[in-house]
Amino acid sequence: MKQVFDELLRFLHQGIAAIFRFVELIWTWSVDQIARLAAEPWQQWPLWKELLLVVILVAVVFALYQAGRELLEAGAEILGAFAHLLGVVVRTLPHVLLAGVIALGGVWLVNHLDNSFVRMPIWLQAEQTSPQEKSPAPSPSPSPSSSPSSAPSGQQK
């Protein structure tokens, strides 16, 4: 069970790391584009280009605000889900402890209980046969004269 849990955590870790690498790539590219836009000599532009620059900046700020708001909401939901998960784990601890105590008691009973007072029902005894009764009758052993390897070592030349 621990191995399955470790694999699940490793899978989640790799998935989250891949998502953050992708977000970092997009973020870096976006910041680079914004820096290139800010580096332009906008003071010498005509008025319509300056207004277009203001519209672009408002759109960028709005998009970043939306992204930040969604990240904040997602973070709050993740923390809530994690808190709920911890609550469930804590609530299940008594049941897991009880299962462990029952298993421990069962193992102790099996190992320390005297079986002499327990009698098997007759109908079960009739169906069970001992291993000696189940094995086929031994085949007659070959005579020593028919087998050259069965001769005593002192008689060979």
Image (cartoon, rainbow, N blue to C red):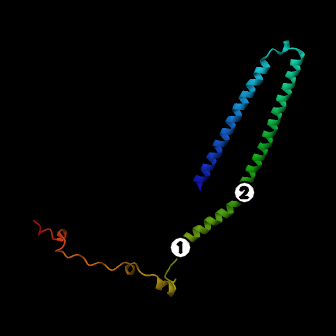
Residue 88: name its quadrant. bottom right
Residue 136 in the image: above or below residue 59: below
Q: Residue at x 29, y 78 (%)?
A: 139
Which residue type does callout 1 highlight? Val
Q: Residue furthest top?
A: 44
Residue 109: name its quadrant. bottom right
**Callout 2 touching callout 1 (CB < 8 Å):** no
Which residue type does callout 2 highlight? Val
Observer-nearest of 130 and 107: 130
Per the model, the C-alpha gap separating discs 2 and 1 is: 33 Å
Image quadrant where one finds the C terminus? bottom left
Task: Point out residue 23 in the picture as x, y percentages from the top left corner.
Answer: 71, 35
Q: Residue at x 33, y 80 (%)?
A: 137
Image quadrant where one finds the N terminus? bottom right
Residue that label 1 marks: 110
Task: Point out residue 82 in the picture as x, y percentages from the top left corner.
Answer: 73, 49
In the displayed structure image, the side of residue 86 where residue 69 appears, left or right: right
Residue 87 in the image: above or below residue 104: above
Q: Residue furthest left?
A: 157
Q: Residue furthest front?
A: 146
Residue that label 2 marks: 88
Mark 2, secondary structure of its residue: helix
Exactly how many numbered labels are in the figure? 2
- Report the disc number at residue 84: none
In the displayed structure image, the side of residue 9 where residue 71 appears, left or right: right
How many other residues sit within 10 Å of disc 2, few (<14), some (14-19) or many (≥20)? few
Observer-nearest of 36 and 102: 36
Task: Point out residue 58 in the picture as x, y percentages from the top left corner.
Answer: 86, 27
Q: Earlier in the sequence, mark 2 or mark 1?
A: 2
In the displayed structure image, the side of residue 38 where residue 100 appears, left or right: left
